[in-house]
């Protein structure tokens, strides 16, 4: 379906729903086309082509609410789907807070060009994709006698969607993504360590296509013969590409649903200090070709650049329309766009060089955070650092603490955020962190 | 464990989707004599056996060794209770066919959400491209898989209205609030799921299945002098709506209140290495993370697993026997046949301490020249099958629970978990403890919570020094993630003692 056909179907669905008892309805229709290739040890392991589409509705009947989705998009199927949705909604309890957002909040056009679509991706042939995947693999394959396996992966996706609601919102978007990944495994006396490296982005021509396999091999060689170190308090550097793991409980705690359900350690913290003054974080939807850039969110609410944390002070939560009404708060958006951390001046390597004795965290494994209390504990892997040098890899250790004071220990942010991710977080250095090992 | 899961089902009426697509008009398949069941599944998907053979032939036309078709029609519904009322619901309908062609251990895959012959043939030709020779394939005669029945449905979810579910959700809310004055919030989620599956492969095998699933979860928030604690309980089975009883609701409500109220006195143990006693039931997460994934044959076929060179070796004490079972009646991990048309079974992974089998899909069984174990599973018709666990548990051992706890001077007892993870190659695994107790001088003392335990798979398996006789399968509803696909699983365990794990 092209964009006009999607709009036409959505208009029919809205008309049908309103005629048959719905007070309000929002309709979204999307399609997605993607290719996934895996090559292992110079042989194609799998080749997959996907084509999917879907329609979802949020429907309001007699002050009652439900939402539904289907991938059967023939008009008559969709009409009976809507009829059933109306019947089912009537069984639910009334909820005075459920309605479409106020039209005042909607995106009404005139936003900047975000540059999120590369038409070239749709025209790539299978050979180009396979050759590229092989190129990634061959940078590592056969390059070290300890290698037991090298896999490389290609993925792309082209998606387009529209949203229309009975309150007057109309909007569409289209996006492309392309990515290359390498995973290398080695044989060693203590196990079969593996490591990955990847590159991704929106545009084929801008995608970095070299050094991925080479970097994965270098990374895995560094992981041979890990050891635990003693339980204690250490300064810790968390590498940029995994730093999002330690920041995700903050994101969860900022959601309106978490605040309302009392599963947030950030309840009542607006305009209060929640982190070191070094920390400033914005939600910025307007970065040109940013992975999370958008002009409106999934309720049609116009995107706005907002401070989340300014010099350690909490400024904004992620509040959708429903929980905004329940909490008596103005809606911001129920989801993030690009989360942008203010960067520092040094790279992770420079921070390591200045570290007397501590740990560089390069990976997380398992663990969790109690949303209500902020208590967390995560498994880690990385390196023991002494006098500015990596002494040996570490594994089988935990990092633990409470989110309410952990972020006050932030000592420095790196200058190395990953620009192709929606979470633009640099490497982070903390002081005095609890690690458990031997 | 399962709140992050997207387990939703369709609302009462859309149930009709199951019948709307009837009646069929199959003329060409009359020449083949199929059972009424097979005919009804063909008509459900508006296809004929003749069409299936044409699509399979297209998937085989470039010289693949094998091809299969996986038709799926899944209906989900979820209802949610907040603020004492069931005031939101979600449903999803998913419909299509996955088409796979294999050449040796290479996979070509495509799927179609349009089940017209032209659309399916087009997808089949895409999958066929994994091979590049000419085909000598001629369709095989259709043979039907002997049906099994590991799950029975008395009242189907399709015939169960939202209206019938609400009183049970409401009861849980009311029971939890009534049990303790400190309760400040309750959320209840009820999800049901019904899948119609039709499978057909290039060897002529046809199989069909009706797969029900239900998950019910209750979340309890309590407040005491400004402190907030939360806990949740859940149950999940392959059952119809006969699952919903007042007794079940009362049991779950009491359990979540009892656990939440103990959290106010909970502490964290001093971090470091210590003896860990894992209570019966959910502690099967140890088997799932520390061993189960590493026993999946795709990782071993690719030499990636830390267990890749340990087949037939002694890896644990004599009293350690570990099973992966796809045949437990009504269990969330059970299947009448796996997603590659192979019969499921009770597979012994570790027999009296000796590694005796991996978990196989079709590709790995061919590679190792063994019979398939029925572990080839996929998230949906949009996904490529791979070896997955079903219900993974340890058989009873020679010790007693009391004897095990009494043997620990300074350690912890844990029996409630939220999640875990493993690194297949290095063998490190973790699981996150939601609830347990300190063990001091052989006795359970103060409650503990919110700590991560980390260890190494082969070492932890060798370090299981005591196993009790109180095996319990946990039906809390685990969802296992692997390579971006999720699969419903369960686990079980008798009380065991592990000599040393890192706690922090």
Image (cartoon, rainbow, N blue to C red):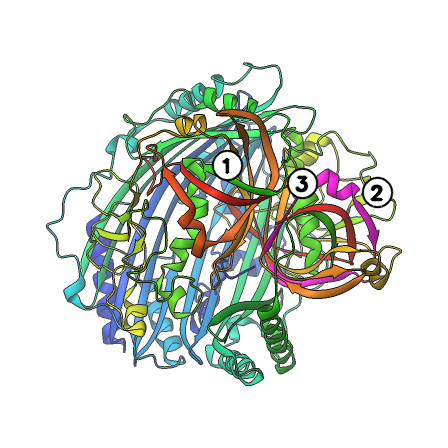
In the rendered view, does B353 fall on the left or right side of B127?
right
**SS assignment at label 1:** strand
Residue B504: horizontal and vertical position, in percent? 61, 49
- Given residues B333 and A326, the one toward you in this image is A326
Q: Tell me which chain the residue with mark 1 is part of.
A: A
Q: CA distance from mark 1 to mark 2?
A: 35 Å
- Given residues A349 and B27, the one toward you in this image is A349
Answer yes or no: do the residues labelled 2 and 3 have beta carbons within 8 Å? no
Give yes or no for residue A95 being in the magenta stretch: no
Answer yes or no: do the residues labelled 1 and 2 have beta carbons within 8 Å? no
Whether residue A398 is situated above or below residue B146 in the rendered picture: above
Whether residue B350 is situated above or below residue A26 in the rendered picture: above
Q: Residues within 10 Å of mark 1 (few under 14, many from 20)?
A: many
Q: Is residue B49 visible?
A: no
Instruction: Name the residue at 31% across, 66% down.
Output: A58
Q: Disc 1 vs disc 2: which is toward the camera?
A: 1
- Given residues B217 and B89, the one toward you in this image is B217
- Given residues B172 and B186, the one toward you in this image is B186
Instruction: Name the residue at 76% across, 43% down.
Output: B461
Instruction: Name the residue at 42% across, 63% down.
Output: A264
Instruction: Name the residue at 62% across, 30% down.
Output: A226
Q: Tell me which chain the residue with mark 2 is part of.
A: B
**SS assignment at label 2:** loop
Numbered range of the magenta stretch: B451-477
Q: Which residue is mark 1?
A: A361
Q: CA distance from mark 3 to mark 1?
A: 17 Å
Q: Which residue is mark 3?
A: A438
Q: Which residue is mark 2?
A: B353
Q: Disc 3 vs disc 1: which is toward the camera?
A: 3
Question: Based on the displayed image, in which of its 4 quarters is residue A424 positioned?
Answer: top left
């Amino acid at each position: 379906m092209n964009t006009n056909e999607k709009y036409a179907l959505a208009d029919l669905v809205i008309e049908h729903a309103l005629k048959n008892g719905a007070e309000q309805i929002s309709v979204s229709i999307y399609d997605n086309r993607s290719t996934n290739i895996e090559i292992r040890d110079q042989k194609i392991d799998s080749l997959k082509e996907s084509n999917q589409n879907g329609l979802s509705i949020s429907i309001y009947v007699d002050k009652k609410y439900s939402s539904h989705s289907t991938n059967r998009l023939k008009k008559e199927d969709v009409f009976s789907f809507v009829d059933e949705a109306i019947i089912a909604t009537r069984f639910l309890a009334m909820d005075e807070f459920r309605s479409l957002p106020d039209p005042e909040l909607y995106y009404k056009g005139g936003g900047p060009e975000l540059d999120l679509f590369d038409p070239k991706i749709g025209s790539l042939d299978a050979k180009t994709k396979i050759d590229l995947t092989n190129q990634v693999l061959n940078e590592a394959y056969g390059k070290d006698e300890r290698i037991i396996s090298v896999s490389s992966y290609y993925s792309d996706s082209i998606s387009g969607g529209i949203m229309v609601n009975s309150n007057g919102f109309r909007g569409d978007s289209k996006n492309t993504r392309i990515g290359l990944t390498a995973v290398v495994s080695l044989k060693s006396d203590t196990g079969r360590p593996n490591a990955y490296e990847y590159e991704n982005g929106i545009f084929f021509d801008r995608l970095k296509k070299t050094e991925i396999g080479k970097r994965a091999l270098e990374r895995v060689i560094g992981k041979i013969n890990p050891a635990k170190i003693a339980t204690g308090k250490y300064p810790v550097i968390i590498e940029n590409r995994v730093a999002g793991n330690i920041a995700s409980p903050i994101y969860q705690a900022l959601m309106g649903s978490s605040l309302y359900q009392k599963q947030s350690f950030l309840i009542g913290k607006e305009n209060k200090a929640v982190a070191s003054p070094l920390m400033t974080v914005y939600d910025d939807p307007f970065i040109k070709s940013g992975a999370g850039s958008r002009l409106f969110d999934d309720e049609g609410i116009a995107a706005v650049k907002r401070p989340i944390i300014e010099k350690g002070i909490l400024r904004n939560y992620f509040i959708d329309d429903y929980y905004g009404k329940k909490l008596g708060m103005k809606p911001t958006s129920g989801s993030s766009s690009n989360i942008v951390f203010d960067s520092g001046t040094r790279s992770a390597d420079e921070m390591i060089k200045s570290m007397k004795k501590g740990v560089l965290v390069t990976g997380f494994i398992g663990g969790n955070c109690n949303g209500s209390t902020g208590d967390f504990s995560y498994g880690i892997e990385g390196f023991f650092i002494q006098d500015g040098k990596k002494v040996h890899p570490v594994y089988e250790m935990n990092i633990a603490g409470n989110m309410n004071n952990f972020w006050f220990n932030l000592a420095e942010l790196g200058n190395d955020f990953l620009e192709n991710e929606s979470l633009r977080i640099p490497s982070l250095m903390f002081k005095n962190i609890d690690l458990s090992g031997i | 464990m399962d709140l992050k899961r997207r387990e939703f089902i369709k609302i009462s009426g859309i149930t009709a989707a199951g019948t709307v697509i009837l009646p069929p008009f199959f003329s060409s398949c009359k020449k083949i004599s199929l059972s009424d069941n097979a005919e009804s599944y063909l008509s459900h998907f508006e296809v004929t056996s003749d069409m299936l053979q044409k699509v399979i032939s297209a998937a085989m036309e470039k010289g693949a060794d094998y091809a299969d078709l996986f038709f799926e029609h899944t209906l989900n519904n979820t209802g949610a209770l907040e603020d004492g009322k069931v005031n939101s619901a979600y449903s999803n309908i998913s419909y299509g066919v996955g088409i796979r062609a294999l050449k040796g251990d290479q996979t070509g895959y495509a799927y179609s959400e349009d089940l017209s012959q032209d659309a399916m043939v087009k997808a089949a030709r895409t999958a066929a491209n994994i091979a590049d020779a000419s085909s000598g394939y001629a369709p095989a005669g259709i043979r039907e898989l002997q049906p099994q029945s590991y799950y029975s449905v008395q009242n189907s979810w399709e015939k169960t209205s939202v209206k019938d579910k609400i009183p049970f959700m409401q009861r849980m809310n009311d029971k939890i609030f009534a049990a303790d004055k400190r309760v400040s919030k309750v959320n209840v989620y009820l999800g049901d799921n019904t899948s119609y599956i039709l499978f057909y492969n290039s060897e002529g095998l046809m199989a069909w299945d009706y797969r029900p699933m239900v998950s019910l979860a209750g979340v309890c928030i309590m407040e005491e002098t400004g402190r907030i604690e939360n806990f949740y309980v859940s149950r999940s089975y392959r059952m119809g709506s006969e699952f919903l009883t007042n007794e079940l609701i009362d049991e779950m409500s009491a359990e979540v209140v009892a656990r939440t109220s103990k959290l106010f006195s909970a502490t964290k143990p001093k971090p470091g290495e210590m003896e860990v006693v894992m209570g019966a039931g959910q502690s099967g997460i140890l088997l799932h993370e520390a061993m189960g994934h590493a026993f999946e044959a795709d990782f071993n076929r690719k030499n990636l697993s830390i267990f890749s060179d340990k087949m037939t070796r002694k890896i644990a004490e004599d009293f350690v026997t570990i099973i992966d079972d796809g045949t437990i009646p009504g269990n969330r991990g059970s299947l009448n046949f796996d997603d590659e048309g192979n019969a499921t079974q009770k597979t012994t992974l570790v027999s009296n301490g000796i590694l005796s089998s991996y978990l196989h899909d079709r590709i790995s069984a061919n590679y190792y020249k063994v019979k398939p174990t029925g572990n080839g599973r996929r998230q949906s018709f949009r996904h490529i099958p791979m070896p997955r666990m079903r219900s993974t548990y340890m058989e009873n051992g020679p010790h007693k629970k009391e004897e095990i706890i009494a043997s620990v001077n300074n350690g912890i007892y844990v029996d409630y978990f939220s999640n875990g993870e493993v690194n297949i190659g290095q063998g490190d695994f973790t699981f996150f403890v939601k609830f347990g107790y300190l063990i001091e001088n052989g006795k359970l003392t103060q409650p503990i919570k919110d700590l991560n335990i980390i260890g190494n798979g082969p070492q932890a398996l060798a370090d299981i020094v005591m196993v009790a006789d109180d095996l319990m399968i946990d039906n809390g509803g685990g969802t296992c993630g692997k390579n971006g696909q999720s699969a419903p699983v369960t686990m079980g365990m008798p009380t065991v003692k592990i000599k040393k794990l890192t706690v922090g």
